[in-house]
Image: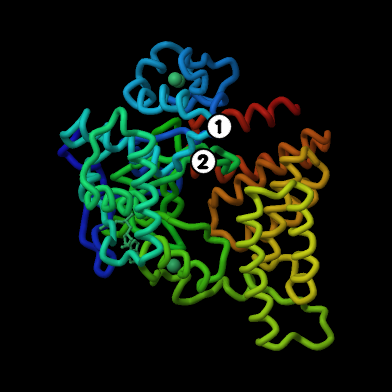
């Protein structure tokens, strides 16, 4: 019930971290700590047609909106349920045509404005933290971030003017800043991006690089499960970022997006940094520190170059960037080095896109073991890698390798997603079909 908090947890002040969530009872690995329906959410434009816009069910043969022919639904109930949100975009998508291109954050914020109006009281997604309480770090935004918010505000006014009464500029700026710091992205079991959402109670949790819970999604509901045993009185932490990278990289990302430096056990001991930065052991003369630093700088540049190139280069040009950078970095980095793994992961993605299953499998095979070392136990990154690899093996009729990989994915997913999740049932069925 709203107003009664979340059983087994409490909202607290966490020294140096603002507000946070604390356990009042014991949670064992795999226990559901709480679930939180989305306050509001939006399906990513790329996945239209494959998922119901309202309930995020993945299935074939969804029916499309007769007006815009762009939104797809399970049935009339889902279409009706979605109309208060979809009507913001339905006619606008038709009239703007190709020129309709608001960012996903803008689309989400438009929905927040509607939701606030439709439901001004506290919602069932705000049992412990209300959306209006979101930390926005407004005073810390630099010029670049302020300009980005202004661009988003301009797009919001441009694409949504017909259906929305806008708050004034200052309030909009704070709303965008709050969403940037507290928003979530929804991914499927292979970590493909499905959409964006706000889950206020989930946003109450602070970050740790050695998190004791993981967030997964069942449709548009977020579920928080323990991945370490949690004792009464302990703070509950999830991870905000990809934990593959060394301490310095993680903290660059945390400062840039969330305005804090992490003081968790991993960040103080840096126990995994050496393995994450593994240097070739077979070299006759080990590289100097300066050379290593230079290569790290190169790696970071390539990562950024690739991120931009994805929007306009062809798959074979992208593969070339990966292969060339792997060759160059391979002169001093081991294949288990996270910068090597990053580029192999990108290469695998391109191979999958090109339906080069053999190529994707070869990259996947190199990635999956070091991933299990670098990531914490029960990582969604590791589970999804085993899942992709297992499905590739089965597609290539490598039955026993496929079943083995799927079982590895399953072991993690049963804890992270819970034994009764439909993703778990699907993987079990894929394994069963091989018997
Ligand atoms: C999603 S909010 C989490 C709830 C937040 N503490 C609050 O009071 O609203 C993210 C913000 O919490 C703070 N935070 C989260 N994890 C932290 C950590 N490990 N150390 C310091 N601050 C942290 C940062 O200010 C960050 O921008
Ligand atoms: Zn539906
Ligand atoms: Zn429509
Ligand atoms: Zn940390």
Left or right of residue 420, residue 301 in this image? right
Quadrant housing the N terminus = top left
Left or right of residue 379, residue 206 in this image? left
Q: Residue 184 in the image: state x and y as whole percent.
A: 41, 46
Mark 2 burial class by Cα count in 10 Å: few <14, some 14-19, many 20+: some
Residue 211 shows in this picture: yes
**Circle on res. 253:** none
Element under label 2?
Answer: strand
Depth check, front residue: 240 or 230: 240
Q: Quadrant of residue 309?
A: bottom right
Left or right of residue 191, residue 368 in this image? right
Mark 1 burial class by Cα count in 10 Å: few <14, some 14-19, many 20+: some
Q: Quadrant of residue 47?
A: top right
Ligand 1, by image quadrant, is bottom left
Residue 37 shows in this picture: no
Q: Nearer the viewer, mark 1 or mark 2?
A: 1
Residue at the image point whose x is 76% and y is 76% from the top: 332
Residue at the image point whose x is 69% and y is 27% from the top: 432
Depth check, front residue: 246 or 296: 296
**Is 52 located above or below residue 314 in the figure?**
above
Element under label 1?
Answer: helix
Q: Residue 73 in the image: state x and y as whole percent.
A: 48, 18
**Circle on res. 187:** 2
Residue at the image point whose x is 28% and y is 52% from the top: 173
**Circle on res. 47:** 1
Q: Are marks 1 and 2 in contact (CB under 8 Å)?
A: no
Between discs 1 and 2, the one toward the N terminus? 1
Residue at the image point whose x is 34% and y is 51% from the top: 182
Depth check, front residue: 181 or 16: 181
Q: Quadrant of residue 390?
A: top right
């Amino acid at each position: 019930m709203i107003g009664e908090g979340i059983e087994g947890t409490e909202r607290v002040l966490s020294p140096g971290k603002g507000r946070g969530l604390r356990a009042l009872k014991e949670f064992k690995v795999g226990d559901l700590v709480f679930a939180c329906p989305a306050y509001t959410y939006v399906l990513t434009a790329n996945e239209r047609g494959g998922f119901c816009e309202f309930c995020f069910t993945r299935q074939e043969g969804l029916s499309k909106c007769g007006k815009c022919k762009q939104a797809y639904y399970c049935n009339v109930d889902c279409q009706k349920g979605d109309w208060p949100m979809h009507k913001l975009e339905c006619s606008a998508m038709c009239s703007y045509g190709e020129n309709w291109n608001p960012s996903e954050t803008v689309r989400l914020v438009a929905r927040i404005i509607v939701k606030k109006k439709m439901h001004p009281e506290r919602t069932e997604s705000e049992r412990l933290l209300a959306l209006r309480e979101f930390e926005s770090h407004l005073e810390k935004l630099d010029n670049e971030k302020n300009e980005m918010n202004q661009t988003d505000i301009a797009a919001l006014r441009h694409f949504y003017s017909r259906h929305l009464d806008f708050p004034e500029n200052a309030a909009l700026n704070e709303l965008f800043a709050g969403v940037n710091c507290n928003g979530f992205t929804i991914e499927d079991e292979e970590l493909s991006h499905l959409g964006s959402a706000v889950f206020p109670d989930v946003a109450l949790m602070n970050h740790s690089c050695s998190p004791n819970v993981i967030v997964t999604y069942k449709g548009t509901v977020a579920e928080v499960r323990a991945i370490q045993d949690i004792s009464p009185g302990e703070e509950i932490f999830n991870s905000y970022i990809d934990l593959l990278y060394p301490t310095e990289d993680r903290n660059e990302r945390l400062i840039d997006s969330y305005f804090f430096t992490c003081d968790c056990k991993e960040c103080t001991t840096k126990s995994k940094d050496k393995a994450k930065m593994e240097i070739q052991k077979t070299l006759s003369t080990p590289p100097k520190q300066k050379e290593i630093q230079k290569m790290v700088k190169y790696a970071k540049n390539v990562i950024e170059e690739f991120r931009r190139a994805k929007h306009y280069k062809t798959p074979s040009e992208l593969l070339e960037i990966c292969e060339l950078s792997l060759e160059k970095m391979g002169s001093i980095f081991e294949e288990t080095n996270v910068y090597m793994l990053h580029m192999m992961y990108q290469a695998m993605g391109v191979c999958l896109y090109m339906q080069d299953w053999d190529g994707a499998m070869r990259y996947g095979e190199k990635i999956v073991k070091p991933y299990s070392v670098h990531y914490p136990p029960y990582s969604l990154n590791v589970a999804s890698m085993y899942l992709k690899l297992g499905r590739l093996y089965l597609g290539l009729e490598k039955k026993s390798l496929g079943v083995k990989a799927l079982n590895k994915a399953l072991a993690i997913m049963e804890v992270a997603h819970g034994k009764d999740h439909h993703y778990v049932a699907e993987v079990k069925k894929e394994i069963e079909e091989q018997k």
